[in-house]
Image: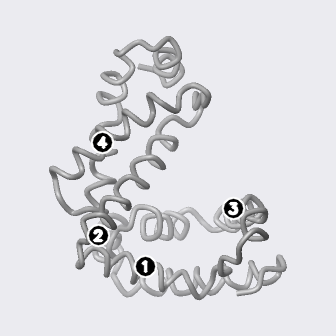
Amino acid sequence: MDDNLIVNLYLRRDENAIEQTSEKYGARLRSLAHSIVNDRLTSEECENDTYMEAWKSIPPHEPRDYLYAFLARIIRHIALNCCRYNNRLKRSAYICELSNELEQCLPASGGAEFSIDDIALRETINAFLGRLDEEKRNIFIRRYWYLDSTADISKRFSVSESKVKTTLFRCRNRLREHLEREGYKI
């Protein structure tokens, strides 16, 4: 079913919206959650919580052109919160490792001015990602959005792990330089 029709079901408060969403995106959403929580049952709970949150969020949001991205953002936050709540040391350490990688190329949060600047920062990062070639952009996003391991990324794109690591290192450095040119203090 088309995303526009699914959103219309949500807007009409038709419970078939959840069924159609699950049919179209359920496997992808569970996979995203599983890459974060590393547990099948928890990822299924995250998926169900995502449908509930989507039900509450549509309206006022009407993500007709970006329904999967809308749902992916919701499930990612739910899964990360599950990780924090359940205090899964191994996964928490992995997430901290990824945070440390990006920490060196992203500006630190600094209260109110950071909140105001958040939209501009997002646009700057999106512009940077838009300038990367497709392979580099996909590697970067798989690592830092989907939280894939370098081994998984190397298999997905049929490249060596060292190429993935080098690509990520260079992309982080280029991102840092890009942000500094845009006036951000790292």
Q: Give the structural element (helix, strand or loop) at label 1.
A: helix
Disc 1 target residue = 98
Q: Amino acid at mark 1?
A: Leu
The N terminus sits in image quarter: top left
| Left or right: where 141 falls relative to 159 | right
Precedes in sequence: disc 4 or disc 1 = 4
Identified by mark 4, the residue type is Glu
Vertical arrangement, residue 8 with respect to residue 117, above or below? above
Q: Distance of mark 3 from mark 4, alpha carbons?
A: 26 Å
Residue at horizontal 22%, vertical 44%?
Answer: 44
Q: Nearer the viewer, mark 2 or mark 3?
A: 3
Q: Residue at x 79, y 70 (%)?
A: 113
Q: Nearer the viewer, mark 2 or mark 4?
A: 4
Identify the mark nearer the N-term, 2 or 4: 4
Quadrant of residue 165 in the image?
bottom left
Work out how far the residue at label 3 is from the one at label 1, CA to CA, in angstroms: 18 Å
For disc 2, the marked residue is: 152
Q: How far apart are the two marked residues, 1 and 2, measured between alpha carbons?
A: 15 Å
Q: Residue drawn 40% across and 80% down?
A: 96
Q: Amino acid at mark 3?
A: Arg
Q: Give the percent coordinates (x, y) of residue 181.
A: 82, 81
Q: Which residue is mark 3?
A: 122
- Which comes before the other along the chain, label 2 or label 3? 3
Above or below — where is 81 with respect to 177?
above
**Real-space Cα distance between discs 4 and 1?**
23 Å
> SS class of the residue under badge 4?
helix
- Nearer-N-terminus badge (1/2): 1
Quarter of the image where the C terminus is located = bottom right
Q: Residues within 10 Å of mark 1 (few under 14, many from 20)?
A: some
Image coordinates for residue 173, horizontal then vertical, percent: 62, 87
Label 3 vs 1, first from the N-terminus: 1
